[in-house]
Amino acid sequence: MPSDATTPPTTVAVAVAKSVASAERAHATTVRMHISEIARFLQDNLGQRLTARIANINDPKQVGKWASGDTNPRPESEQRLRAALQVFQLIQDAESLYTARAWMIGMNPQLDDEAPAQCIAEGRMRDVMVAARAYVDGG
């Protein structure tokens, strides 16, 4: 929530504290989940093809293998999947499941009008997290 002359400082402080707690919760959730759970969640909520794109792989069926626990992604793909889940959880916690999905696939002005999912696939996880926090903070 942006601060202005009409917003009391305590309201801003509460909003920032809430945002930080939400980001910490999203991080903790992501760290504790097994990669098969993460792959399954993303596959269920973003689809197999988009999840494969986020992981920067060509074969969407590989996501199903990860989700079932048959195989594990390479470290680079796992990093992308964990980042996608953390961002998704942050947005979902502040808004809703549907908003989080739309946010991940829509053009984002803070990312030069690219979709956050595409940016994660390109390895720009930090840029996406900054954009997600700004969105949650109302900016």
Image: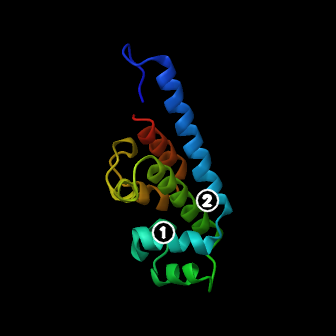
Q: For this view, does 66 lie left or right of residue 139?
A: right
Q: Residue at x 60, y 67 (%)?
A: 78
Q: Is residue 1 above or below residue 24?
A: above
Q: Residue at x 49, y 41 (%)?
A: 133
How far across and down, in percent of the image, does residue 135 sit? 41, 41
How far across and down, in percent of the image, does residue 25 sit? 60, 49
Q: Quadrant of the N terminus?
A: top left
- The residue identified by callout 1 is 42
Give the amino acid type for the residue marked by disc 2 in the picture.
Thr
Cα separation, mark 1 vs mark 2, equals: 12 Å
Give the amino acid type for the residue marked by disc 1 in the picture.
Leu
Say the numbered circle drawn on residue 102: none
Q: Is residue 134 above or below residue 54?
A: above
Q: Which colour scheme appears in the figure? A: rainbow
User: Which residue is nearer to you in this view: 76 or 48?
Assistant: 48
Q: Is residue 124 among what the camera can see? A: no
Question: Looking at the image, which residue sits at the far top?
Answer: 5
Mark 2 crowd level (few <14, some 14–19, many ≥20, 10 Å Cα): many
How far across and down, in percent of the image, does residue 101 sit? 38, 59
Say the numbered circle drawn on residue 30: 2
Q: Quadrant of the C terminus?
A: top left
Question: Looking at the image, which residue sits at the far right?
Answer: 32
